[in-house]
């Protein structure tokens, strides 16, 4: 028998002896009986408090009463359990963050091209509009539409059309400036927001994109179709509602289509 288990056994024997004295009618008038009762109640209360603490630390589950363990060993065992729970909690937090990040990306990203979707573009367009108004800086807004895209889908099918859109998205990503905002506006249409760009610089960026797109083809040897895109761009006016600027960019895009496509038109 270890020293600790001997202490536990002796302690139990002592409590049993105290309880026997308290239960003995012969000692009911003993002046020390009240003090002995307080000692017994105090010991029982402390034991109950320790049991509650151990149950709480174990997730409010009842612990098995293992009389072979000392109080120190039982606390060590609980600490190890809590450490395991902490590791599980850390892993849960990491998983939760990953799920949240995945959902955030899904909410802001076009699933086909990987570019920003219309929802995210609207938020960023609002932010850039407010920033331009606050700083008094220029802001160019452009709409881009893939030329004759219906022919690609009709001739080669939607899978090839999807590949074409992804190739065009790559051309946009390659040629924009680091701080430009761009994404898929819907269907075969894309939106580009060019902060701090004067008309000449905006046209230059869009021309780079246009020329990169013209090097793309789809359809293999069927024969292949050369891709192209049309652009309409305008500058946000001071105090102007962004919807009015988008309308002017759309009008400029329509003009580019009407004048033969595969070109950049600067709106009024």
Image (cartoon, helix red, strand yellow):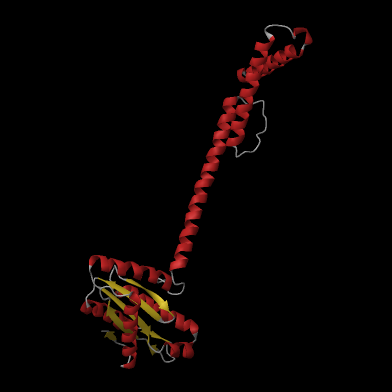
Q: Quadrant of residue 135?
A: bottom left
Task: Tell me if residue 225 can be seen.
Answer: yes
How many numbered markers are drawn? Answer: 0
Image coordinates of residue 123 in percent, x first then y, are 38, 68
Residue at 78% over, 7% down: 26
Left or right position of 64 against 106: right
Image-quadrant location for residue 69: top right
Q: Quadrant of the N terminus?
A: top right
x and y percent of residue 235 in the render?
A: 26, 77
Q: Residue furthest right?
A: 25
In the image, residue 191 sits, relative to residue 98, either above or below, namely below
Q: Is residue 59 left or right of residue 194?
A: right
Q: Is residue 214 visible?
A: no
- Residue at image location 40% in from the left, 69% down from the top: 120
Relative to 118, residue 80 above or below? above
* Residue at horizontal 36 percent and vertical 75 percent from the top: 170
User: Residue 257 lies in what quarter of the image?
Assistant: bottom left
Front residue of 25 and 218 = 25
- Nearer-the-camera pick, 124 or 133: 133
List x then y, in percent, for residue 129: 31, 70
Q: Of 109 and 44, which appears nearest the observer?
A: 44
x and y percentages locating residue 265 in the rendered image: 28, 86
In the rendered image, which quarter contains the C terminus? bottom left
In-image side of 68 versus 251 (left or right): right
Against 51, is 167 above or below? below
User: In screen coordinates, is 15 left or right of 216?
Assistant: right
């Amino acid at each position: 028998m270890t020293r600790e288990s001997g202490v536990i056994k002796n302690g139990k024997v002592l409590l049993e002896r105290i309880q026997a004295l308290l239960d003995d009618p012969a000692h009911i008038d003993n002046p020390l009986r009240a003090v002995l009762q307080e000692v017994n109640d105090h010991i029982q209360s402390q034991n109950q408090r320790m049991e509650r603490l151990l149950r709480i630390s174990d997730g409010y589950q009842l612990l098995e009463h293992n009389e072979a363990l000392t109080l120190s060993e039982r606390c060590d065992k609980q600490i190890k359990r809590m450490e395991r729970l902490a590791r599980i909690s850390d892993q849960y937090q990491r998983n939760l963050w990953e799920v949240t990040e995945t959902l955030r990306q899904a909410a802001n990203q076009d699933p086909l091209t990987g570019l920003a979707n219309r929802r995210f573009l609207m938020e960023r367009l609002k932010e850039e509009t407010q920033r331009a108004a606050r700083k008094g800086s220029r802001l160019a807004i452009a709409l881009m539409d893939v030329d004759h895209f219906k022919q690609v889908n009709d001739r080669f099918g939607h899978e090839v059309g999807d590949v074409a859109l992804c190739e065009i998205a790559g051309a946009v990503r390659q040629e924009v400036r680091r701080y430009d905002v761009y994404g898929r506006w819907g269907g075969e249409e894309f939106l580009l927001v060019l902060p701090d760009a004067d008309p000449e610089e905006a046209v230059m960026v869009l021309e780079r994109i246009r020329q990169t797109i013209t090097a793309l083809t789809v359809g293999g040897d069927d024969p292949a179709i050369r891709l192209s895109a049309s652009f309409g761009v305008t500058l946000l006016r001071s105090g102007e509602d962004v919807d009015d600027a988008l309308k002017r960019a759309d009008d400029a895009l329509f003009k580019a289509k009407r004048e033969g496509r595969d070109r950049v038109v600067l709106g009024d």
